[in-house]
């Protein structure tokens, strides 16, 4: 071969090598994991590479391999491995695959070992964390928008965004992400809404008069086709905005900016425009046809609209709350007496942020109840309905219950208990998960049953799938933001009450509740008599016959829990209640380091508030902390 030909061949081979190197795809980064009982969840950062075809996950039983591919070619940067055994160590590697089938070098192997949950608390942490991942990994990090569901091409639901805001604050508290990461994502999200174009045009805007469209384009952040300007979804968004305003209380420029942007978003909402100058807020508005015909009147998820609208600087008229409550009904259903709303989401959404436990308006005072108690009774009624199972649906029991709006064999629809609701046997985990703060004694066992019995079909890298129907042998294929969100937030309110505590600090919220006629319920001055020999604590207090009371207990004076044994109706001038452990409380009184008690009553004006009572392992007499 001539020297010139050799040189040309070498140049050609070098060019081919360089071209091949240019097409090489990078190894994925940000490889993180969640470990549960017989499950391992993997997440990693999405590669921004136009040649990306997908990802491959490899698993081995030894650090040196051999590694075997599991799960096929993945088009999303997440994987849930359910084919694992507890106490067995598994090693995982991850690669990216280009459209030319070239595969990246693998990530370093990580060793993970699934294990049985040591406690309900560890189980709930796992459920919370995986559900939070929907909002962290599923969102568009460039604008903070969260998809309505995991299906490809899903638009953003602004209600999913609001749950994401609160979920990010919760995640920072738990250390799942750093506070710096949380601040950056929250800033990005709030700026999307603060800076997005507002106006009456049918396209190219994010909202109008401070209100926002129900669905937005995930990339551009403007109105998705045929979406309405939604009053309830905007109100929910403001709930999350006010929550993060209180959570990010630091003196840094970024956290100061979060609070300022939150104020801007809340204060520019024109409440009276959406009420059309009346005392009833309209359900929505379309740019081409105007206001919808329906108003928010009567009990449902819309309570938050009026609680916030009455507290605004440009508030709704004072008569708005009475207009809202004018649509209430009161009745007894499946052994519980309460204001009915058939699907569970109506009893949950406003409660994600507002702590209704110890306040009541005139309607609830007249019925010896609170909105928290109302939601508790609705939860108990759903379980009783499932136990009675008048429709003879497959699998319904005391640990298989929960009807709400969700996907089903016939598409997305509203499920609820009769007589007001329709049931076709479709169960949604968010119904019990979002009610955990109201009735943990039935919600926690139900979530655990779903996990232990149906995990292979409904557990994913984002927690529970939307719904399932055992009789129809149907299982949802998607997870939904408005279903994962209440699970994250209400588990937190059950475990720490941190979301409630922060949200209730907002002056806008306090003004709104006061203008709606809410007042604090009175606490009774109780005496405490411990009995170490019997491992019991007995409370007694001066009572009014016929008045209803509720006992609460706490391990630390921070988080308080209602006794699952329910309300106590006094029959004479002294009422008593004895803590004998489960089911009245979570453990035997003298088996815990300390325990505090307090008693409040329904349906009366507020007298002076006594201090709670303390008891516990070292207590022999009542203590005033």
Image (cartoon, rainbow, N blue to C red):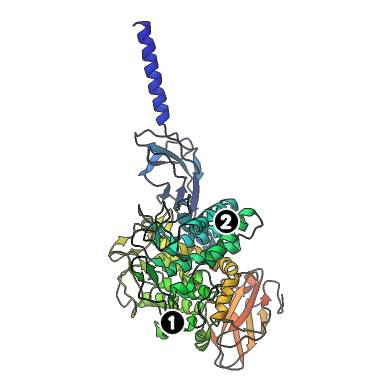
Which of the 4 image quarters holds residue 213? Answer: bottom left
Give whichever of 476, 411 is nearer the camera: 411
Any part of residue 146 in sight: yes
User: Going from the N terminus, do you reach mark 2 or mark 1 first?
Assistant: 2
Q: Residues within 10 Å of mark 1 (few under 14, many from 20)?
A: many
Q: Residues within 10 Å of mark 2 (few under 14, many from 20)?
A: some
Percent position (x, y) of residue 619?
70, 75
Percent position (x, y) of residue 618?
71, 72
List the single residue furthest toward the front: 200
Any part of residue 301 in sight: no
Relative horizontal placement of residue 397, taking residue 118 as reference (left or right):
left
Q: Is mark 1 on a helix, strand or loop?
A: loop
Relative horizontal placement of residue 532, taking residue 117 as reference (left or right):
right
- Report the residue at 34% width, 6% height from top: 1
* C-alpha distance separating marks 2 and 1: 36 Å
Residues at circles 2 and 1 in contact by the CB criterion of under 8 Å? no
Residue 172: assigned label: 2
- Report the residue at 33% width, 60% height from top: 475
Q: Is mark 2 on a helix, strand or loop?
A: helix
Which of the 4 image quarters holds residue 75? Answer: top left
List the single residue furthest toward the top: 2
Placement of 565 over or under 227, stated as above or below: below
Relative horizontal placement of residue 224, taking residue 534 as reference (left or right):
left
Give whichever of 150, 108 is nearer the camera: 150
Give whichever of 596, 276 is nearer the camera: 276
Q: Mark 1 points at which residue?
A: 339
Give whichever of 617, 310 is nearer the camera: 310
- Report the residue at 51% width, 89% height from top: 366
Which of the 4 image quarters holds residue 345? Answer: bottom left
Percent position (x, y) of residue 423?
32, 73
Percent position (x, y) of residue 592?
63, 69
């Amino acid at each position: 071969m001539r020297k010139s030909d050799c040189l040309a061949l070498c140049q050609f081979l070098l060019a081919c090598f360089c071209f091949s190197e240019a097409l090489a795809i990078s190894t994925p980064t940000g490889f993180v994991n969640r470990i549960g009982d017989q499950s391992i969840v993997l997440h990693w950062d999405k590669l921004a590479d136009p040649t990306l075809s997908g990802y491959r996950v490899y698993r081995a039983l030894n650090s040196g391999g051999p590694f075997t591919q599991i799960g096929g070619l993945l088009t999303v940067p997440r994987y849930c491995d359910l084919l694992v055994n507890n106490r067995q160590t598994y090693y995982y590697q991850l690669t990216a695959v280009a459209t030319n089938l070239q595969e990246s070098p693998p990530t370093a192997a990580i060793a993970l070992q699934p294990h049985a949950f040591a406690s309900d608390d560890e189980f709930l942490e796992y459920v919370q964390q995986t559900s939070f991942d929907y909002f962290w990994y599923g969102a568009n990090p460039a604008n903070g928008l969260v998809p309505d569901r995991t299906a490809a091409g899903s638009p953003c639901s602004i209600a999913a965004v609001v749950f994401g805001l609160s979920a990010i604050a919760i995640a920072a508290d738990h250390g799942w992400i750093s506070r710096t990461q949380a601040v950056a994502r929250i800033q990005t999200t709030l700026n999307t809404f603060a800076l997005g174009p507002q106006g009456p045009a049918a396209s190219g805007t994010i909202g109008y008069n401070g209100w926002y469209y129900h669905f937005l384009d995930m990339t551009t952040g403007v109105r998705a086709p045929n979406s309405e300007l939604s009053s309830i979804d905007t109100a929910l968004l403001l709930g999350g905005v006010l929550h993060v305003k209180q959570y990010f209380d630091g003196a840094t420029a970024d956290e100061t900016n979060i609070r300022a942007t939150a104020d801007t978003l809340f204060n520019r909402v024109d409440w009276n425009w959406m009420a059309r100058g009346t005392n009833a807020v309209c359900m929505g508005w379309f740019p081409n046809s105007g206001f919808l015909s329906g108003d928010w009147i009567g009990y449902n998820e819309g309570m938050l609209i009026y609680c916030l609208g009455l507290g605004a600087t440009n508030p709704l008229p004072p008569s708005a709350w009475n207009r809202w409550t004018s649509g209430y009904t009161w009745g007894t259903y499946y052994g519980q007496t309460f204001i009915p709303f058939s699907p569970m989401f109506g009893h949950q959404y406003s409660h994600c942020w507002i702590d209704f436990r110890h306040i009541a308006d005139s309607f609830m005072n007249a019925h010896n109840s609170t909105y928290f108690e109302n939601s508790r009774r609705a939860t108990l009624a759903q379980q009783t309905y499932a136990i009675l199972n008048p429709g003879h649906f497959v699998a319904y029991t005391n640990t298989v219950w929960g009807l709400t709006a969700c996907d089903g064999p016939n598409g997305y629809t509203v499920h609820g208990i009769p007589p007001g609701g329709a049931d076709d046997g479709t169960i949604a985990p968010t119904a019990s998960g979002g009610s955990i703060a109201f009735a943990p004694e039935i919600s926690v066992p139900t979530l655990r049953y779903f996990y232990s019995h149906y995990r292979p079909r409904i557990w994913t890298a984002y927690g529970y799938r939307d719904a399932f129907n055992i009789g129809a042998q149907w299982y949802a294929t998607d997870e939904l933001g408005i279903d994962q969100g209440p699970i994250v937030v209400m588990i937190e309110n059950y475990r720490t009450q941190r979301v409630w505590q922060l949200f209730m600090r907002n002056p806008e919220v306090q003004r709104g509740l006061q203008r709606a006629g809410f007042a604090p319920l009175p606490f009774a001055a109780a005496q405490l008599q411990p009995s170490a020999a019997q491992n019991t604590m007995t409370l007694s207090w001066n009572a009014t016959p016929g008045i209803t009371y509720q006992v609460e207990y706490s391990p630390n004076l921070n988080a308080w829990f209602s006794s699952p044994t329910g309300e106590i109706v006094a029959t004479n001038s002294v009422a008593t209640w004895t803590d004998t452990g489960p089911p009245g409380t979570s453990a035997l009184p003298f088996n815990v380091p300390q325990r505090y008690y307090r008693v409040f009553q329904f349906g009366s004006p507020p007298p002076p508030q006594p201090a709670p009572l303390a008891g516990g392992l070292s207590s022999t007499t009542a203590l005033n902390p």
